[in-house]
Image: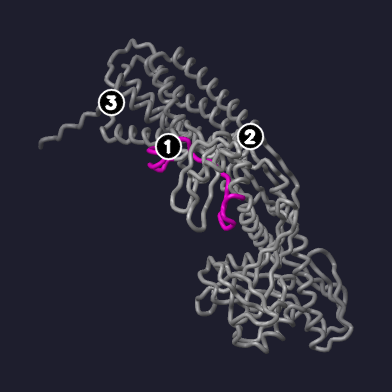
Amino acid sequence: MQLKPKRKTVLNHYPAWKYVALVTTIIIMLLSALPSWFGEEAAVFIKHKDNGIAPVTLKHQLDSHSVDIKRIDQKGNSTTVVLQDAADQNKTKGILTEFSNKDDIVTLGMVPAAPSWLLEMGFKPIKLGLDLRGGVQFLLDVDMQQVFRSHADQAADSVKAFARENRIRGLHVHQSNADGFVVNTPSDEAQSAVRQYLREQFPQWDVQGKGDLGLSVSLKEAEKQTLTNLTVQQNLQTMRSRIEELGITEAAVQRQGEHRIRIELPGVQDPAAAKNVIGATASLAFYEVKTSPTPGSMMIPDDKGAPVYVSRKPILSGEHIVDARAGMGEMGTPEVNISLDASGGKMMSDYSAKHIGDPMGTAYSEYSRDSKGNVEQTNTIISIATIQSQLGNRFRITGVGQLEEAQDLALLLRAGSLTAPVTIVEERTIGPSLGAENIQNGFAALALGMGLTLLFMAVWYRKLGWVANLALLINMVMLLGLIALLPGAVLTLPGIAGLVLTIGMAVDTNVLIFERIKEKMREGRSFAQSIDLGFSSAFATILDSNITTLISAATLYAIGNGPIQGFALTLGLGLLTSMFTGIFASRAVINLFWGKDARRDVRV
């Protein structure tokens, strides 16, 4: 029997496809990192409702106010005015707001300064955090006690109404704490009836006996958590929509902790203007819809601007709404379930009994302050539904479109019902000059750290040190390119600290490998054998150390916020890129130059 010859193992050999994949990845990351090198330019955007204004006319108007511009780009109904000086942004916005049509939307923003061919490929600069760009940051606290109290009052009113309907005399209801109340009943039968009523109508409430004939009623912890999540979610959406009035296209509105909201407004240097918008209030009302203008009616536009005629006096106002939640109906169609307090339920019941088959409109009103501090009101019909049966303190609105639209409607309804006061507990203003100084100092530290590291590696490890230096430069290019590619990734000042730390950790990978190679050389092996064994023996150690640090970075990102997340992001991504360049890129270069070197007296 003839034995097949064993396939000879080739030391330090990479197939061609690995080199192609490596070079392709580096080129893509380099193209992604390049726009960040060019930076960004301050701009003012105009979104025209009709035809845009001619660039020559805009330039003449701005020149008359001594505003220096780089260029004016116009595409369709959008115009972008790129400025020479970022300090002229607010001034330019005011000029263009007065000069443009009243329906045009003028906003502030930044545009990439990179060449057009690079931007057309889909690459964009890294987004900078508030500490690097400058702006205003608010930390708001949502007072949930008002929401819990509102629900407790609604449940208490319902118990009183139940007692009146069932002729239970001597029943008393009084507030016990912020999220509960106590019911004192005249007899055991009355106590049993009230307990049964609460169990059927208010399953989200915990009912406990108190004394001989008393009942202590309080919200369950699970329901408290649900209400908190719904209220904060509603406030998040409301804040995002209000911030659009400031003309900020890159604002960040995020939940922080259980019931706090963090708002970052890059480029805004006037906290008073931001407070006026963030502190606006909203309300809700239901109206009888008219087919045409009649005496005693008024016109309110719908969300598309079409006129809707309604009675001047609302059927019900928003203060009677306790809750609104989106769901799927019996026929599988989206709907919004609304809960009213006792008095609101009676008003809705009386009206709906007499108007079955008639349309009813839901109007959303928002109050805000203009630049002079005057209160402005905006009314919009957000839903028109047909009354199909007599309604009580709980009813549903159908015909609201898709489930996502139903969820949005529920949020708007809760905007007028879940009265959760929002207070600003922290305010920070960072000037653009300080942001620029942070960038300069941060990258100066990065350059210094990289320079010293490159020098050390070149002197200490000689020829292999130059390979490590090449890998380190590739690592930084890949890291910056990866941050620019990831949606939602923001570079902050702690993020730059993460970049500096990544330099040391990236070199760590090469140091471990090179030390293993030196050990194998001292054992008398050839340079090629030492390279092969050095990389394979160091791989497990490198993997273990980096995974433990990755776990720490992931934990920081999950539980942290703002600057902490920025640091965790660059640290985690830096670990991944350093492993890639330290193990694969370094190996690819070493294989090319010394992969077949059989000498045993090479100094490493």
Residue 110 horizontal side relative to residue 376, left or right: left
Give the residue pinned by disc 1.
Answer: 32
Label 1 to label 3: alpha-carbon separation: 34 Å
Q: Image quadrant of residue 169?
A: bottom right
Which stretch appears magenta?
A: 98-123
Q: How crowded is mark 1: few (under 14 residues within 10 Å), some or many (20 or more)?
A: many
Numbered badge on residue 432? 2
Q: Residues within 10 Å of mark 3 (few under 14, many from 20)?
A: some
Numbered badge on residue 11? 3
Determine the residue positioned at 50% across, 36% down.
70
Which one is earlier in the sequence, the residue at label 3 or at label 2? 3
Which one is earlier in the sequence, the residue at label 1 or at label 2? 1
- Residue 168 coordinates in the image, percent (x, y): 84, 86
Label 1 to label 2: alpha-carbon separation: 25 Å
Q: Which of marks 3 and 2 is in front?
A: 2
Please state which of residues 398 and 371 is positioned toward the viewer in this rendering. 371
- Residue 461 coordinates in the image, percent (x, y): 43, 15
Label 2 secondary element: helix
